[in-house]
Image (cartoon, rainbow, N blue to C red):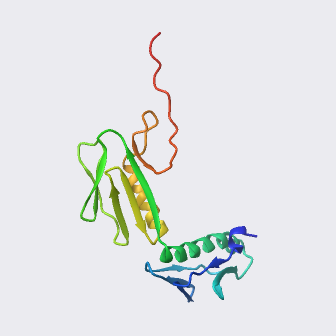
Amino acid sequence: MSRIGKRLINIPSQVTVSVKDQVFSAKGPKGELSQQIPLGIQVVQQNDCLVVERVSESLLARKLHGLCRTLVSNLVEGVFQGFERRLEIQGVGYRAQMDGKKLVLNIGFSHPVIIEPPTEIQLQVENNTNIIVKGINKELVGKLAAKIRSVRPPEPYKGKGIRYVGENVKRKVGKAGKK
């Protein structure tokens, strides 16, 4: 039995949810999102909570139970609060800046790297080294943050590069000198 799938999803008072033809949709103060629910899983509203249930005990339904519950929970949380990922740039001369809606990264290449976000994602830069990725769709926020990080991931010798805030980069010892 899925432990995650059994948990209830609380619906905040500003969020309205509906299920029609296996499509779950949530609307809140931040926007509106919808998700296709696979066959074998159903979402039932009980008072101010949502319950994700399996229609059958097939292997596929058991596999998807916890996943669907998490996806539905992320939709409800996204339209109510939204999601954000924070990245930090470390390295001498490495910096980021906004050019309209585009993110311009100067991180040691011979050219600046320009990243254009999707329309539903907002980017902010704080003091040239901190990047904030915000949006209501958790998947898109995570993908864009991973894309920005992949431009220059932190290297293990000096720790230079782009990393998530709070990410621990394992450092390696450099060459030992001649003795």
Q: Single out the residue that lies furthest toward the top.
A: 179
Residue depicted at 46% across the width and 51% down the height = 164
In the displayed structure, does residue 54 sit left or right of residue 100? right
Residue depicted at 55% across the width and 72% down the height = 74
In the displayed structure, does residue 76 sit left or right of residue 65? left
Residue toward you, 95 or 65: 95
Q: Where in the figure is residue 144, as x and y percent of width and height?
A: 40, 61
Residue depicted at 44% across the width and 66% down the height = 140
Q: Is 34 rendered above or below residue 92? A: below
Q: Where in the figure is residue 64, as x and y percent of width and height?
A: 64, 71
Q: Where in the figure is residue 134, as x and y percent of width and height?
A: 41, 66
Q: Is 161 rendered above or below residue 133? A: above
Q: Single out the residue that lies furthest toward the front.
A: 127
Q: Where in the figure is residue 40, as x and y percent of width and height?
A: 66, 80
In the displayed structure, does residue 73 sit left or right of residue 124? right
Residue toward you, 75 or 19: 75
Res. 85 in view: yes
Res. 42 in view: no
Total numbered badges shown on the rendered structure: 0
Q: Quadrant of residue 54?
A: bottom right
Q: Is 10 rendered above or below residue 172? A: below
Specify the quadrant that holds the N terminus: bottom right
Residue toward you, 149 or 46: 46
